[in-house]
Amino acid sequence: MATRLLLLGIFLTGLAAQFVKPVGEALQGKVFLGGALLGLVGYVLYDTVKDLAVSLRAPMRAQVKSRELGGFVTEAFHARTVEISFLGYTGETLYNELYHRLEGLLEDPGPTRHVLVRFLVPDFQQPMTVPSRVGPQGVPVDDEEFRKRLELKCQEYDQRLSAIAHRLSVVGRVTAECEYRFYPGIPRDKICIFNRELVLHGLYDVAARTMGYGSDPEYYDPKGYLTDLNVWSREDTDDAKAAVATWNKHFDDLWQLAVRPAWPRGTGV
């Protein structure tokens, strides 16, 4: 309202100067008055626009569903250098989005020239409380066979993504690297980092259960596709920028310490 009144006053003063001679003579040569008025208008408008920008800014920790990862993957591939990092359970949800996106680069790479994909998953070769078999009174019981099935699933994802990365590099239009590594512990956090600028983080329901195959018992088996994820972006507040930097360093440090699987990498053409 104040801005409107100020602008209206300036307009009426200028209009009067055009048709009322005394007013025009009074204003003639008053350069500093005009400059001061314009400066005041600019200041008020700047404050107004700044307040509007703040009011329209997205919340620092907007929440999304894991099934929405496809949109983030697509957006990440608009960059010339694509870097996607994952820490979680098996990476199945992200793998399903990445596989077809990487295949598409063979026909139409768009702006993308280099892709780096890193997966950190639990060391399924070690005894675990999650995933595990549900024992009497809900006590977790380590199940080597169940762990092995999950490891084989990760091995398949790693080999298929690595095979596509190899094909892309052979064609030569895009260089690509895809790799799985193991971290110690249970799958508690789900983290996805896109181009080091956007971080999604959520917590698995570690007590989630699933029925086994055939006559198998129940298992503690987190459902990644059901996990809600909080969003941090470098384009948000200073606190959000700091959070993104912290997550990037945390992942890089874990990656350096992680164990490389003994399984062969996919290089089929």
Image: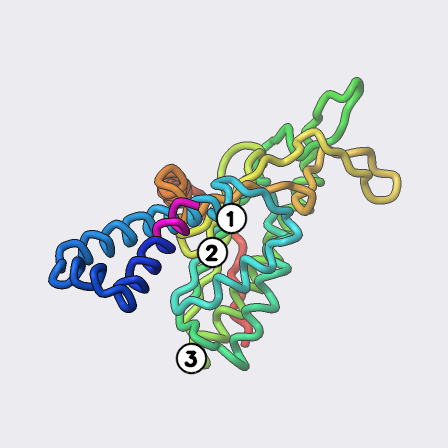
Q: Residue at x 54, y 57 (%)?
A: 72
Residue placed under numbered mark 2 in the picture? 84
Q: Say whether marks 1 and 2 touch (CB < 8 Å).
A: yes
Q: Residue 184: x and y, percent?
A: 50, 35
Q: Secondary structure at mark 3?
A: loop
Looking at the picture, which amino acid does disc 3 mark? Arg
**Stretch in magenta:** 1-6
SS state under label 1: strand
Give the residue type at disc 1.
Cys
Q: Which residue is mark 3?
A: 173
Q: Position of residue 111 (x, y in %)?
A: 43, 74
**Would residue 2 be counted in the magenta stretch?**
yes
**Residue 143 seen by the camera:** yes
Viewer-side label of 1, 3: 1
Q: Give the residue at x 39% y 49%.
A: 5
| Among numbered discs 2 and 3, the one appearing first in the sequence | 2
Q: Which residue is mark 1?
A: 192
